[in-house]
Image (cartoon, helix red, strand yellow):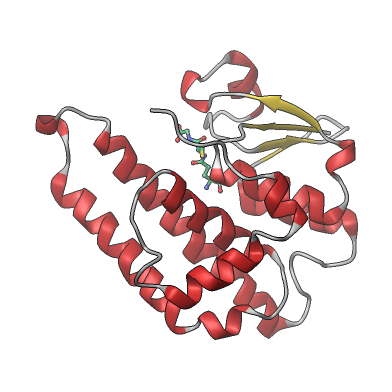
C-alpha cells in the first residue's frame, strides 16, 4: 500500500498514527508530497489534490483522512480505531469531527496570515477563530471523559491540538488546562511520539 502524505500535514498524521496503531505501518510505502503543487502524481490518485491518500495494493485510492483511517481499521479487523458499540462510536466520530473542523478552520487562518493585509478576509478569519475557541471550550468542559482509551477520536484530537500549537494558530494551553494535561499524557504514546510534526520554519 502507498500513503501519499507529508510529515507536516495534520490530516496525514492521523493516517500515520492509525497505521502504527493497527500495525499496518510496515506495509506502507510513504510518498512525501506537497498537495499545493498539485503534481500529476497526486491528482491522478486524488483529483482534489489533498493529502492523505491511501492507494491499496489493488490500486484503489482512498481519501480523505476519516475514510483512510476507517479502511485501515477494517483491514486490521480489531476495531481498535472505530468502536463497534454505538455510544462509543458516536463519541469517537464526534471528537473526530470537532478535531477535523478545527483543522479546517486553522488552515483558513494560516492561509490568510500568509496574504498581504489588503487581501485578508478579516470577517471570515474571525469566524474561524471563534469556531476554534468555542470547540476548545467544549473539549475542555468534557476533558475528564477523554480518558476512555485511544481511538480515532483521540487520534484526531492529538493531531489538531498539536497543529494549533506547532503552527501557532492559537495559544490555547493556558486556558484549556485539563485538555493540555490530557495531550501531554498522549505525547508519551509511541505512535504519537513517532509522528511529531517537524518545527515550523517559516
Ligand atoms: N478533509 C480532508 C482534509 C485534507 C486536507 O485539507 N489536507 C491538506 C494538507 S494538511 C491539503 O491537502 N491541502 C491542500 C488543498 O486544500 O488544496 C481530510 O480529512 O483528509
Q: Is residue 94 visible?
A: no
Can you say whether 95 is above or below 129 in the image? below
Please identify the quadrant where the N terminus is shown.
Answer: top right
Q: Is residue 7 visible?
A: yes
The residue positioned 72% from the left and 69% from the top of the image is 150
Q: Residue furthest top?
A: 40
Residue 188 percent coordinates (x, y): 70, 60
Name the one closer to the observer, 170 or 139.
170
Quadrant for residue 74, please give it: bottom right
Residue 35 percent coordinates (x, y): 52, 27
- Count the labels in the image: 0
Quadrant for residue 61, please give it: top right
The residue positioned 61% from the left and 23% from the top of the image is 42
The residue positioned 48% from the left and 49% from the top of the image is 163
Image side of residue 199 versus residue 23, left or right: left
Residue 169 percent coordinates (x, y): 35, 49
Image side of residue 115 versus residue 199, left or right: left
Q: Residue furthest left?
A: 118
Can you say whether 119 is above or below 93 in the image? above
The residue positioned 57% from the left and 46% from the top of the image is 11
Can you say whether 54 is above or below 32 in the image? below
Can you say whether 73 is above or below 40 in the image? below
Image side of residue 185 versus residue 81, left or right: left
Image side of residue 15 versus residue 124, left or right: right
Please identify the quadrant where the C terminus is shown.
Answer: top left
Residue 168 percent coordinates (x, y): 37, 47
Amino acid at each position: 500500500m502507498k500513503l501519499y502524505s507529508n510529515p507536516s500535514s495534520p490530516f496525514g498524521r492521523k493516517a500515520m498514527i492509525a497505521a502504527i496503531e493497527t500495525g499496518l505501518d510496515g506495509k506502507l510505502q510513504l510518498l512525501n508530497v506537497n498537495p499545493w503543487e498539485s503534481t500529476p502524481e497526486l491528482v491522478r490518485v486524488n483529483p482534489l489534490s489533498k493529502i492523505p491518500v491511501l492507494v491499496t495494493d489493488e490500486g484503489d485510492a482512498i481519501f480523505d483522512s476519516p475514510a483512510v483511517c476507517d479502511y485501515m481499521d477494517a483491514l486490521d479487523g480489531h476495531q481498535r480505531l472505530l468502536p463497534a458499540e454505538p455510544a462509543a462510536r458516536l463519541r469517537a466520530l464526534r471528537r473526530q469531527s470537532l478535531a477535523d473542523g478545527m483543522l479546517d478552520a486553522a488552515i483558513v487562518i494560516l492561509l490568510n496570515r500568509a496574504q498581504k493585509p489588503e487581501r485578508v478576509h478579516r470577517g471570515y478569519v474571525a469566524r474561524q477563530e471563534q469556531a476554534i475557541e468555542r470547540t476548545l471550550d467544549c473539549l475542555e468542559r468534557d476533558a475528564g471523559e477523554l480518558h476512555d482509551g485511544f481511538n480515532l477520536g483521540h487520534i484526531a484530537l492529538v493531531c489538531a491540538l498539536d497543529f494549533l500549537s506547532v503552527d501557532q494558530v492559537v495559544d490555547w494551553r493556558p486556558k484549556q488546562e485539563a485538555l493540555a494535561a490530557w495531550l501531554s499524557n498522549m505525547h508519551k504514546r509511541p505512535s504519537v511520539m513517532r509522528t511529531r510534526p517537524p518545527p515550523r520554519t517559516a
